[in-house]
């Protein structure tokens, strides 16, 4: 038995401390459930990597992503939420109470579980990215942009993240080229317009990153881009593509000092594989039909980007976080006959 297994069983453990986890923590703490929030490898989640959040209700001038998260954490702590660092590596959800295991062998046990683990930046799959990630290749312009003062840099992707990265990098870099695999942006019109109107930002359409050049000592020195008039050029290079089409793919070497990925995110559900919780093909946590955060396992709830492949906004994550806490509270009430950790009773049913 692991070290913490003898410790008291928690009412609610929230895995993840981004905006969804924090919102769940505020609601669960205010319901006297004394939630434990587990902060994983990216404490505070994606908002800590953004600059200004302009579309979160109540901040007409915008608010810094980090500030919003810090305030949320203070708010949750004020009502009694407890925070602990530790990456959950496995989950025992077959038996009650649930058990969450950490890498060091520790575990925590809980009656209800809220999964708010969010999503992490996707990588492109270009040659050289494994070696050079962190050495001139980055998924976070706000973290690494200042290292590229005076450089020419690439941003890969055509969504809001890519536009945001490009606009931020334009403060430091000499030039920013957005490389997008199609000829139409996915980004919202307001973000796309800002990027298109910026004098330092150019676009390379129907193009993809094939190889990254450089070394850990020298950093990124260049890249090979491929392009095809119909878009998705790397797909056309694959063996299955007709040779004629593959021959139409153009390659070009470019000199750049940095490459930033803005190609979306993948949900953090690895620790839920081999559990009865259902995952979609995309890896997202499946919740039950209708307006609920319940999953196929009673007592396990999902909130935020980990269960939302569509909206993925800070404000919707806060919304589903609050829903998950309310759903967990109602479930505890139905199972244990209480809605706070003061009166512990045996479950009425499982
Ligand atoms: P996204 O909307 O899914 O866009 C990902 C982009 O990367 C797409 O343009 C996609 O191309 C491209 N892409 C994906 N995989 C690729 C690959 N392997 N190689 C090359 N390109 C690839 O993701 P996101 O931009 O991170 O945005 C996610 C959500 O957060 C959205 O709802 C967005 O509105 C929101 N968001 C908002 C803001 C803001 O308002 N300030 C900032 C950031 C994010 P295709 O277009 O061809 O699919």
Image (cartoon, helix red, strand yellow):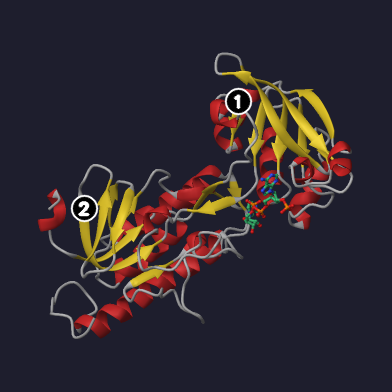
Element on which disc 2 rests? strand
Ligand 1 closer than 8 Å to the CB at disc 1? no
Residue corresponding to mark 2: 107
For the point 21% across and 85% down, the residue is 349
Q: In this rendering, would 271 be left or right of 168?
A: left
For the point 79% across and 42% down, the residue is 233
Q: Position of residue 258 (x, y in %)?
A: 66, 26
Q: Quadrant of the C terminus?
A: bottom left
Q: Nearer the viewer, residue 93 or 249?
A: 249
Q: In this rendering, would 146 be left or right of 93?
A: right
Q: On screen, 253 above or below 3?
A: above
Measured in 3D between alpha carbons, the distance from the residue under mark 1 to the one under mark 2, in whole angstroms, is 37 Å
Q: Position of residue 100 (x, y in %)?
A: 26, 57
The reply to whether callout 1 and callout 2 are in contact (CB within 8 Å) is no
For the point 23% across and 82% down, the residue is 335
Instruction: Evaluate whether residue 134 shows in this view.
Output: no
Sequence-earlier tag: 1 or 2 = 2
Instruction: Evaluate whether residue 305 shows in this view.
Output: yes
Instruction: Tell me where residue 236 sits by quadrant.
Output: top right
Q: In this rendering, would 264 be left or right of 174?
A: left
Q: On screen, 129 above or below 341?
A: above
Q: Position of residue 143 (x, y in %)?
A: 54, 34
Q: Position of residue 212 (x, y in %)?
A: 67, 27
For the point 33% across and 74% down, the residue is 328
| Disc ID at residue 136 | 1
Farthest residue to the left: give it: 6
């Amino acid at each position: 038995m692991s070290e913490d297994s003898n410790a008291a069983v928690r009412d609610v453990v929230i895995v993840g401390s981004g905006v969804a986890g924090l919102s769940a923590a505020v609601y669960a703490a205010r319901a006297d459930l004394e939630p434990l929030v587990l902060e994983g490898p990216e404490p505070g989640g994606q908002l800590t990597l953004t600059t200004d959040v302009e579309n979160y209700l109540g901040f007409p001038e915008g608010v810094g992503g980090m500030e919003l998260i810090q305030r949320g954490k203070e708010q949750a702590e004020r009502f009694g939420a407890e925070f602990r660092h530790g990456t959950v590596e496995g989950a025992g959800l077959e038996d009650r109470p649930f058990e969450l295991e950490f890498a060091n062998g520790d575990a925590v046990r809980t009656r209800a579980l809220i999964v708010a683990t969010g999503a992490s930046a996707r990588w492109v799959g270009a040659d050289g990215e494994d070696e050079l990630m962190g050495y001139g290749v980055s998924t976070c312009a706000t973290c690494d942009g200042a290292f590229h003062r005076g450089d020419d840099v690439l941003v890969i992707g055509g969504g809001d993240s890519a536009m945001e990265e490009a606009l931020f990098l334009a403060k430091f870099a000499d030039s920013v080229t957005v490389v997008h695999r199609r000829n139409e942006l996915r980004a919202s019109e307001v973000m796309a317009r800002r990027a298109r109107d910026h004098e330092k930002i150019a676009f390379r359409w129907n193009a993809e990153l094939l190889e990254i050049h450089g070394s850990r000592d020298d950093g990124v020195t260049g890249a090979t881009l491929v392009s095809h008039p119909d878009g998705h050029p790397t797909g056309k290079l694959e063996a299955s593509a007709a040779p004629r089409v593959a021959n139409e793919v153009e390659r070009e070497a470019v000199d750049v000092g940095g490459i930033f990925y803005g190609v979306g995110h993948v949900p953090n559900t690895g620790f839920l594989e081999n559990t009865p919780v259902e995952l979609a093909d995309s890896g997202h946590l499946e919740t039950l039909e209708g307006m609920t955060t319940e999953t196929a396992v009673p007592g396990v709830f999902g909130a935020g980007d980990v269960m939302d492949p569509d909206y993925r906004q800070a404000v919707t994550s806060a919304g589903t976080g609050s829903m998950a806490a309310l759903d967990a509270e109602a479930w505890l009430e139905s199972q244990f006959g209480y809605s706070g950790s003061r009166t512990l009773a045996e479950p009425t049913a499982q």
